Amino acid sequence: MACECTGVAPGIQGLRVTVALAGNPNSGKTTLFNALTCSRQHVGNYPGVTVEKKEGEFEHDGMEIHVIDLPGTYSLTAYSPEELVARNVVINEAPDMVVDVVDASNLERNLYLAVQFMELGIPMILAFNMSDLAEARGHSIDIERLSELFQVPIIRMVAHKGQGIQELKQAIVHVAGQTPAQQPATVKYGGHIEAELDKLTEALQGSVPDSGRPTARWLALKLLEGDEAVIGQIRREAKNAIDVLQKVEDSRNLLVRELGDDAEILIADRRYGFISGACQEAVRSTVETRHSMSDRIDMVLTHRVLSIPIFLLMMFLVFKLTFAVGDPLMGWIESFFGWLGEAITTYWPEGAAPLLQSLIVDGIIGGVGGVVVFLPNILLLFLAISILEDSGYMARAAFIMDRFMHKIGLHGKSFIPMLIGFGCTVPAIMATRTLENHRDRLTTMLVAPLMSCGARLPIYALIIPAFFPATWHARLLWLIYFIGIVLAIVCAKLLRGTLFKGEAAPFVMELPPYRLPTVRGVLVHMWERGWLYLKKAGTLILGVSIVMWALLTFPQKIEYSRDYNQAIEDVSSKQLPAEEAEELVAELEQARASEELANSYAGRIGHAFEPLIKPLGFDWKIGTAMIGAFAAKEVFVAQMGIVYSVGEADEDSVPLRDKLRENYSPLVGFCIMLFSLISAPCMATIAVTKRESNSWKWALFQLGGLTALAYVITLIVYQVGSICGIGV
Amino acid sequence: MESLASSLSPEMEDYLETIASLFRIHGEARVTDIAERLSISKAGVTQALRSLAAKGLVDYRPYVSPTLTESGKRVAERVQHRHDVLKRFLIEVLLVDSELAEANACRLEHAVDRSVLERLAHFMDFVKRCPRGGSKWIRGYEHSCDPDKETETCERCMVMAIDEYRNRHHMLPTEEATMTLAELKPGETGRIVRVGSIGSIRRRIVDMGATSGTSVTVVKVAPLGDPIEVKIKGYSLTLRKEEAEAITIEARADQEDGK
């Protein structure tokens, strides 16, 4: 450590600048963020909320520029976590400026957000994105005039073509160097409102820290708007809170009386008035072409008759892409890890540290394999989702399906996660990211595991032929899937009626114009999701895999009912024909494995739980296999194979089916399927739920809730079935 | 729910209103504060709270500040709304001064049925809109309230009313009628008069640009009949019919003819 760092040289502070990037959804903010920061990005979460935090860096003119990508919002109310985060970042993290990305082809609504950032009193730059489109639509914008009216620099750009990026960087450096910083124009709200604002500003003087941001005027404005977050803050922090809030109440009442509407509506009206005034001065619109390209596409895609078949076709393609293309890749990954395990086993010095070998082969390699195996599905699904979102179709899909989904307590956009759930719950839960509303998102996340995933299919494939005549097979499979769907709907309704009670999420949503997704945007999105999955969920899944391995492997020293090593030696010493000897050895090894499992912690837990699961018709063997199924649902089959000493069993194993038939009734078989369908989703699901909801609470609630539900339903089915003598 | 609210006594309604108001200001409604506001003894308040809790309108346990239940909130909101309509009528139409209006609205609100109140609100709208009424008419009424002024100006007033009507007629579309956005058919255009109260969604709709005076065109209805797509401020917005029903508009007949 050479000690040259004796102090910060003067002017150095100016070399690092923080910029908050803001903008409406669909304004091209992400494209700009990618263009500015290239690959120097990192993604995290804001504490306590599901909102994602993206940051990046770039350099210009020797200045290090740190970019915080704010969530895309339309406004800065306390209406959604995104909006709260956006304004809190500006207030608490005190960036040096805001760069607000404005879709120039949709100027007025985009400027509404800009005006609210201006009110926060922070230096800002407006990036007029998609200026080419605005011109094509016949809007000619006098940027200089508008810049003068708003008192902020405006950069004209076409982000996806890279136009204007350099100019924007230059402007950031320029604004950062300005002292004193330029203040944006103030919106005037007219006599009555201004009078009330003055009263409140005065009342707030001295009672809030006078540290510049947020200004007393901004607080007064928010109080007048009835902003719950700010009211709460004043109540907690201001010395004369009661006095201030009484004044707020009086002012609000007075405004209703004088102007005939709620203050927040009047204020929104005035903001739009300010914008529309500015636009009248600075924007000239020639007659708009009557039907834009987008409208023409919409005539087909949201057509009264065609839209639903097209939608179903799209969903079919998304599903096919995710799973049909993904499956061979998953197969390769599985065989690669299988091969790796084999290779290590082969080269492992005979008899040396068998426990370590088992940890590496079964625990770690198995675990990493179990994480990576989901990656093709996730990448392909997000490829599809990025294309659907960036092109603008996702909003249409929600528009088409909303009526139906709304009826069952979900949002139009919940359709994709639910559908993907039939393939695999892990990417399904990741797909809930497309839902903006927190309550919709959690509801979808929590019920998604009820859509019977592909990993449960081997269980059904094992059980159904074991107990039921061939004519029933298809019908039973349908029944199981159907039960899952019905339960998902019931649970969604239930959750919306209890935990996530409140106003239904509104469907006040923009239908953005259709756009061609860029290859880069899609790839970046895919990469981001895949990486986040590996980093956040992957490590958790790996950890749980090792715990599962330990449960199944320990304790090592157990008392076998007979000396298997001796017995195996006996067989080989008997000089039997090779085939017969091999068979006998295999039988002995299977019996030993079965005993080991029975005595492992998992087996003991299974035993301990037996009294609890007895009323469901289950014995400890099923219990143990269910514990194994927590690692991955299909493991149930292999575990049943081990406990019944039939060797490596898969869902087509005839000996295992025979064993099942001998030991259980068809009713129990059905109950196994029912329980596997509803109960605790696999650990990967729990890990992803934890990651996506950003809270253990919801992950554990999902785990506990679904298991309890499975228990109750299976209990009823088994008990009623037994009493009525169905399938016993 | 409906019957529950109408069966509440005025005193009980006052309680709900007070709790809601205290809650907005202080974040809680302490029994002491309620007692002070209503000038009733604390014991009286406690008793009333128990009775409200039994009706499922208030969550109340001894020594903990009461909170309104969801249905309690709805009742309180309705009482407040009734109060506002009455007060506006007293101030804007009858030209009563605002303090007197406040006091009288407080007494009137408990005595008026919901249906009468709706009529009153409607009437108020009508007075403002009808060419034979309007602001001039109310000003004329103000004039007539003053016993010193002469009142023989009917003819002049009617001529003025016709002028006002013709002026407006010239500026506004030919057939002006208020309806809700949900009633417009695809292709039809209207102008937003007011976004009605539908909770926090109201704010969202206005934030998205649906301010009064903005022109809005229905583009299409989703294949399953809901939601609808509208063009507003040059972009496409979707909303459910229940949301569209809360938006009052003036239909613009000229646009329809033009198609």
Image (cartoon, rainbow, N blue to C red):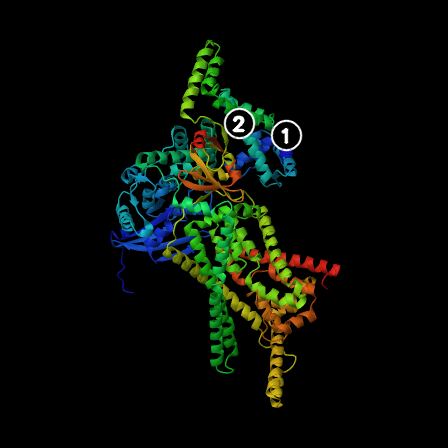
Q: Chain of mark 2?
A: B
Q: Mark 2 — residue?
A: B85
State which quarter of the image contains the N terminus of chain A: bottom left
Residue at left offset 36%, top offset 36%: A275
Q: Which residue is mark 1?
A: B9
| Left or right: where A74 falls relative to A127 | right
Q: As rendered, which of A307 and B144 lies closer to the eye?
A: A307
Q: Local crowd at mark 1 within 10 Å, few (<14), some, or many (≥20)?
A: few
Residue A71 visible in the snapshot: yes
Residue type for callout 2: Val
Q: Amino acid at mark 1?
A: Ser
Tag 2, which secondary structure?
helix
The quarter holding residue B68 reads top right
Helix, strand or loop under label 1: loop
**Reading the chain from its start, which is encountered first: label 2 or label 1?**
1
Find the distance from the CA under tag 2 to the CA under tag 1. 20 Å
